[in-house]
Structures are given as C-alpha cells and as structure tokens.
Amino acid sequence: MTALFVSWGAPFGVAWFLSTIIGILVIALPVMLAVAMLIYADRKIWAAMALRRGPNVVGPFGLLQSFADGAKVFLQETIIPSAANKALFIIAPIITFTVALLAWAVVPFDVGVVLADINVGLLYILAISSLGVYGVVLAGWASNSKYPFYSAIRASAQMISYEVSIGFILICVVLWAGSFNLTAIVESQKGYYGFLNGNGFNPLLFPMAIMFLISAMAETARAPFDLTEAESELVAGYQTEYSSMAFALYWLGEYANVILMCALNAILFWGGYLPPVDWAPLYYVPGILWLFAKILFFFFVFSWVRATVPRYRYDQLMRLGWKIFLPTSLFFVFLVSGFLMLTRYGGAQ
Amino acid sequence: MIHVLAFYLFAILVVSSGALTILSRNPVHSVLWLILAFFNAAGLMILLGAEFIAMLLVIVYVGAVAVLFLFVVMMLDIDFAELRAGFVSYLPFGLLIALVLLAEIVLGIGLWSAGPIELAQRAAPTAPDVSNIKAIGTLLYTRYIFLFEAAGIVLLVAMIGAIVLTHRARGGVKGQNIAKQNRRRPQDAVRNINQPIGQGVEL
C-alpha cells in the first residue's frame, strides 16, 4: 500500500505513515466488531448450555443485542467517585483497552498479511500483555474502595504467576520454530508427518498446547479463573466503581484480550493461517478464513469452559500456577531443547 | 528527520518522567512515572536498533519489577510530610552520590570508547544481517558463558536466601494435601443412619 501512495506522489515517509494508519484501522475496527458479535455469541452459548434462550429481542435472533448494550452504556453518565484519584481512575480503562488492541499489530492473518512483521513478534506480545496488568491495578487503587483494591491485588498476582508459565511455554515453541517472528513460527508448523500442520500434533508440544490454553484462560481472568471479579466475594471486582464508557472499555478490552489469546493458541500451536491438513486443495481456502475458524473454535472452548466449570478457589489457582504449570513447563523447556540438541543441531559436539 | 523527532520525544519523556519520579508527592505516582521512564527508555533502545533489549526491558522492568514496586507502595501507609521533611538535609549527600555516578558513567564511557574492545568493534562491526537476538545469544553463550552462569547462580542464591530469611514455621496452620482431598469419596464423609427417636446421634 505504501507503494500505491508513493505512486500518487507522496514522499515515502508520509506514504508509510498513511498506509500504517489505514492498516491499523483495517485491523482495529473488525476486532471491535468481532468483540461485539462474540459477546453475543458468548451469551448465546451460555444460554444454550443452561437451556435458556439468551438474547433474542433486539434484531433478528437478538443479533443487535451488543450494539444496543453499547448504545445504552454510551448514553449513561460517567460517575467518578469523589474519593477516587481522578486522573488514574480515567487512565486505567484506557490502558486496558489500548493494550488489548496493541498486540494485534504483530498477528499474521496470512502470508505477509501483518501490520508489523518484526523479528521479536512474540516478545512484543509478551511485553504488551505484561502491560495489561496496570489497567487492573490502577483501577483498583484509584477507585479508593475495598473491593476493587482486593481484586486488583488478586489480578496482579494471578497475571504475574501465569505469565511465568506462559513465558516458558512460549520458549518451547520459539525453540522449536527457531524464531520469535510469528509468521516464521506459523511456517515452521508445516507438514508434521508429511500431512498435518500444527505444533499441537507434535507429541513434545501437545502438552504445552493444553497448558497454554488453560494459562490463557487464567491470564485473561476468564472463568474458572475469574477470581478478580468473583461476584460472591468482591461485587464486580476492580470494575465496581466504574460506569458508562469506562466500564465499556473494560468490557471491550477483556473480550479483545480473549480473542487475542484464542488467536495466539491458533498461531502458536494449531498452524495459524495454515489449513489443518497439508493437502493442496485446502490451500485454495484463504488463510485468513482458517485463522478465523480456529479463533472461533477456541472461543467456543473458552465459553464452553466458562459455562460448565465452577470457579477455582484462590489458593488452588496459585497452586496450579506455581506448583504444577511452572515445573511442568520448565521441564518441557529442558525436554524440547535437549531433543533439538540431539537431533536438529547435530548431537553433542 | 522523524528519527530525530522520535529521539527527542523519547529522551525528553525519559528525563522529565525521571524528574517527576522524584518530585511527585504521591509514591504511587512516583512508581507510575518510573514506569513511563522505563517505557521510554525501551523506545530509545528501539531507535538504536536493539529491539531485543527493548522488549526485555518492557517485559522484565515494566511487566514484573515495577508491578512489585507498585504492589508494595500501594499497600504502604506513608506519611508524606514526614517523608519530605528530610529532603533538604539529605540534599548534599544525594548530590554527592549523583556526582560520583555521573563521573563513573563519563569515565566508563570515555575509557570504553577509546579502549581496545570498541576500537576492535569499529574495525569489525557486527554483520548487519545478524539479528541482535542471535548476536547477543552468541556472545552470551560463548565468550561470557561463565559470567552468565555465575549471574544465574547469584540469582538462585539470592532467591533461596530470601526464602530462608522470610520463612518461618508457624504452628496451627492446616496444610492441604491435595491428593488426600481428591482421594476422599462421599462414603468416607457421609453416613446414612436410621435415627431412633429420643436418642442422640452418635458421632
């Protein structure tokens, strides 16, 4: 696209700037639309699992429910508690929302269809997701209220704990792919046993795929790990004092994070934009559709788990993170690197 | 042009947020300014072409260290007035330390840029096609492998030391044995009895 603007007579820098902004809009707007539709999908899935109807009034099959909710929230008054730290109280939801969108910059939708094809793509995602905790912590502190503060403490401990094991899981994938670049990671998953695409089919990485799925739920604080907003203990957690658009920003950011984690699951372990089977006719389907199909599948798994699994106790959550996931993922780092040393990198030298 | 603009933007933000870290009245705000300083330092690293270091700076400092700072500071009950009362009396000492640090940096960079390593580097710089993850990895795991492992051992010792120093065995704590909890079946815990009238339940 930069070339197009250059051919219209713009200098290269300006052309690059314009095309990047267009690229950002082309990614961010559909993500927001997807968030709206996935909130609807989530509610429909829970409803179906609880033998209810779910949203079915606004629009055909209730399809416009999320937009109605959005409009309602938009028209409400933003209430800032008088004891709150105003600047931080307003900044906190903005951080959550921005960070949730930032990470999409490095997600490859097809070969070469990526906003920023940087060679530290995975590290960028780790860096961005480690920023996400500030939105929650600041909200908890700035609200100047008990429940948000408890929730913020829980959230930050939970996110940091699971980031450690996610880091080790990602290292396994990076070792196997030999690159931090997400496109390179996807390409490296081609042709397991000659016909399957995806690290998940690798017996050494399959346990990592499962652990990553669970850690992703914990990292995004989805049920069964949604202790940060456990309504029986903490009212609405760190969002308790929020209303109107500030609340909506948390809502959107949370779902954007969930979709991102689904996309990462697909990209790191199940072949991203590659078809699941390495068979020529399947490559006629555009890669972006395969990626979307995988994202939707994982999203279904997320809401399936949310609808069926009861919430963890906080000590159980910490135990799972530190005593089970951390040692296991560390062990697998040794296993994967040892296997690669013995095979791909030519044995002990 | 845009490179220069970005440099000045990041540099001004680093310096000003560093200053605000010291000047702001609320310790939580101080930590937040510190985080902004870290973040902009990462931006400067990216401008230098050291994207790996930049990402690690964000992951390690912003994502982990600063969160712990924030955690501790948020829960502290600090008397701000008392904290600021000593400012003037500590000022000369602080300035002295700042001066020593500045002298060390100037001396270090001066000696380094005239020293044999830098001169050799200028004669044979790192090949441009080697990404800096690879360059750092090769250097870290070949020439500096012992220092790297020594650093690892120091960290391990520090970690164990911290646990040993803070751990105390408390009495009266009910530990949980998860395997035992999972082994427990309803028939171990529940008993159906046909209770005769007028007698107490035998527990």
Image (tube, coloured by chain):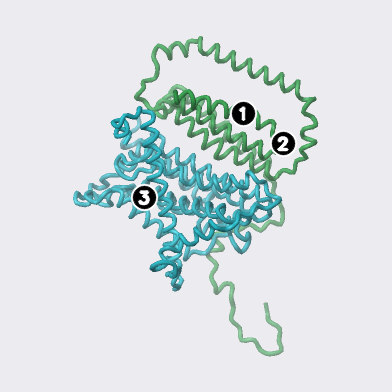
Residue B25 - label? 2
Front position among marks 1 and 3 = 1
Q: Colour of chain A?
A: cyan
Residue A73 or B57: which is nearer the viewer? A73
Chain of the residue that carries numbered disc 2 in the rendered image? B
Q: Residue type at mark 1?
A: Ser
**Does residue A235 appear to the left or right of B200 in the view shown?**
left
Residue A301 or A289: which is nearer the viewer? A289
Q: Is residue A85 above or below residue B144?
A: below
What is the total number of numbered labels drawn onto the structure image? 3
Q: Spot the green chain and give its letter.
A: B
Q: Mark 1 to mark 3: distance in Å?
A: 42 Å
Tag 1 residue: B16
Residue A283 or A102: which is nearer the viewer? A102
Tag 3 residue: A266
**Does residue A278 appear to the left or right of A220 in the view shown?**
left
Secondary structure, mark 3, is: helix
Dot 2 alpha-carbon crowd within 10 angstroms: few under 14, some 14 to 19, many 20 or more: some
Residue B158 or A53: which is nearer the viewer? A53
Q: Residue furthest front?
A: A9
The C terminus of chain A - image quarter? top left
Chain of the residue that carries numbered disc 1 in the rendered image? B
Q: Residue type at mark 2?
A: Arg
Front position among marks 3 and 2 = 2
Q: Mark 2 to mark 1: distance in Å?
A: 15 Å
